[in-house]
């Protein structure tokens, strides 16, 4: 009897040792594989009040379609058959000091658009135009997104998702190899350590100081897809599903060359716009579906606050019109039921999503919109004035950039090969 008990104890000890060995082995395997399976770390808990909340889309509001009479689209003129297209995926529309229109394409080329003509063989309403596209400069090996010319129009500052903040000056269509200056690829933190700028996204320039305000959307770096193109959308989806809120608002001072962090904790910091008096900076927090406001002066100097929510979808670029005193926010997509379910899922479930191949990640629903907002002042609170939209993306979809110029909105997109133009009158 005693021998049987001893054998049973030995068997139990063996089982415990075997189980512990399996657990240790599994832990070692997970530890070794985790950096490969989750190179950006696991997802974190998203509390209910930090999940994206959007207002319902009004299907009867189709003010951003051709039928509304205010929409024009600009396509590239092709003079030589077989030539490579230049007007490709323009995120942001830029205007130089002389009013010349520029775009930065997915191949990191700065392109001027001139000689606008009605499309040959097109409709009589002139809603479709063509433009001569000319390469002005090679912006390097990265993928430029947002940009802005300085007050004199001599230098273009732009956010490159691969390089960081860069600048190119003295542009000339006769010299396409202008030197690109990399201004900031990292920022020094208060503790003296250096933090890389992994996803420079949008840029605006202070009209008073000339300081350059730009967003660092995420600490997730962009990589290339199977076609060899920089996949900026995939990085944004990972940031949203992870829920870690690593977006930042940064400032570059041309007079010293220094960069500092103004605001943190944005859920994919995206569009950037400075007011006329340079008292505040607006920036969008994409997956919060919110416009944020950072105070540069006044009683709230150095503080950031949520300015506006209640939009119809995720937010992207933003631009302010000094003449109108209003601002405009690009809304590339709605918050789909799948997106809502994903953000409400527990962290471990979203971590499984982070392991999926990129072509399995949820796709956006066809939609395109721009919100006109009043940023608020001493007498009037901030509010949404109107939503201009194409509810099913029939004529306009995936608006990722907006620029106000001369009473019109110029719409850019990472997925379209044209420029949308909307009359505000």
Image (tube, rainbow, N blue to C red):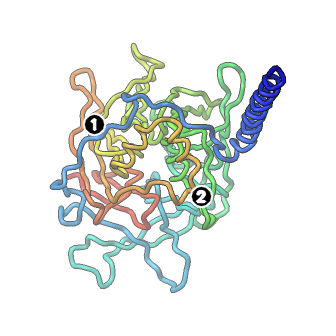
Q: Residues within 10 Å of mark 2 (few under 14, many from 20)?
A: some
Location of residue 274 with respect to 396 vertically, above or below? above
The picture places residue 210, in percent across and down from the top left corner, at 52, 35
Q: How many dots with numbers? A: 2
Which residue is the site of mark 2?
230
Q: Secondary structure at mark 2?
A: loop
Location of residue 371 with respect to 363 vertically, above or below? above
Q: Which residue is found at the position 59% from the left and 49% from the top?
A: 355
Q: Are marks 2 and 1 in contact (CB under 8 Å)?
A: no
Horizontal relation, residue 294 to residue 119: left or right:
right
Is residue 213 in sight in this rendering? no
Q: Which residue is found at the position 39% from the left and 24% from the top?
A: 305
Horizontal relation, residue 41 to residue 269: left or right:
right
Location of residue 362 with respect to 248 vertically, above or below? below
Looking at this view, is 291 or 147 the one in front? Answer: 291
Q: Residues within 10 Å of mark 1 (few under 14, many from 20)?
A: some
Question: Residue farthest to the front?
Answer: 1
Q: Which residue is found at the position 46% from the left and 55% from the top?
A: 91
The picture places residue 33, in percent across and down from the top left corner, at 72, 44
Q: Quadrant of the N terminus?
A: top right
Looking at this view, is 61 or 280 the one in front? Answer: 61
The CA span between labels 2 and 1 is 31 Å
Dividing the picture into quadrants, the one containing residue 281 is top left
Q: Secondary structure at mark 1?
A: loop
Question: Residue farthest to the left?
Answer: 60
The picture places residue 65, in percent across and down from the top left corner, at 23, 62
Picture disc at residue 310 = 1
Is residue 228 in sight in this rendering? yes
Horizontal relation, residue 406 to residue 204: left or right:
left
Picture disc at residue 293 = none
């Amino acid at each position: 009897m005693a021998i049987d008990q001893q054998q049973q104890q030995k068997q139990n000890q063996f089982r415990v040792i075997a189980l512990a060995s399996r657990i240790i082995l599994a832990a070692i395997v997970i530890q070794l594989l985790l950096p490969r399976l989750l190179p950006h770390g696991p997802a974190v808990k998203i509390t209910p009040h930090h999940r994206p909340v959007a207002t319902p889309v009004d299907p009867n509001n189709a003010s951003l379609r051709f039928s509304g009479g205010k929409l024009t689209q600009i396509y590239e003129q092709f003079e030589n058959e077989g030539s490579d297209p230049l007007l490709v995926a323009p995120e942001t529309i830029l205007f130089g000091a002389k009013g010349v229109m520029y775009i930065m394409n997915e191949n990191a080329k700065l392109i001027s658009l001139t000689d606008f003509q009605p499309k040959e063989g097109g409709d009589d309403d002139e809603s479709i135009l063509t433009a001569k596209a000319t390469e002005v400069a090679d912006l390097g090996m990265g993928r430029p997104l947002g940009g802005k010319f300085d007050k004199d129009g001599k230098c273009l500052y732009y956010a490159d998702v691969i390089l960081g903040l860069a600048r190119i000056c003295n542009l000339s269509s006769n010299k396409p190899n202008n030197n690109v200056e990399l201004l900031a690829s990292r920022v020094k933190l208060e503790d003296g350590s250096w933090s890389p700028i992994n996803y420079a996204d949008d840029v605006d320039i202070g009209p008073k100081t000339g300081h350059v305000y730009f967003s660092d959307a995420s600490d997730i770096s962009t990589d290339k897809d199977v076609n060899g193109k920089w996949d900026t959308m995939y990085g944004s989806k990972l940031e949203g599903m992870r829920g870690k809120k690593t977006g930042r608002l940064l400032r570059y001072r041309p007079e010293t060359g220094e960069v500092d962090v103004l605001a943190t904790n944005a859920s994919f910091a995206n569009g950037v716009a400075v007011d006329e008096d340079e008292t505040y900076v607006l920036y969008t927090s994409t997956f919060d579906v919110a416009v944020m406001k950072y105070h540069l002066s006044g009683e709230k100097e150095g503080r950031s606050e949520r300015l506006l929510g209640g939009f119809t979808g995720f937010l992207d670029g933003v631009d302010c019109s000094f003449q109108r005193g209003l601002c405009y926010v690009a809304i590339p997509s709605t918050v789909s039921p799948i997106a809502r379910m994903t953000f409400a899922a527990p962290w471990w479930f979203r971590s499984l999503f982070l392991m999926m191949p990129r072509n399995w990640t949820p796709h956006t629903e066809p939609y395109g919109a721009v919100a006109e907002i009043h940023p608020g002042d001493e007498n009037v609170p901030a509010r949404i004035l109107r939503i201009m939209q194409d509810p099913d993306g029939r004529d306009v979809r995936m608006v990722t950039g907006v620029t106000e110029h001369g009473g019109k909105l110029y719409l850019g997109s990472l997925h379209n090969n044209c420029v949308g133009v909307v009359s505000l009158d």
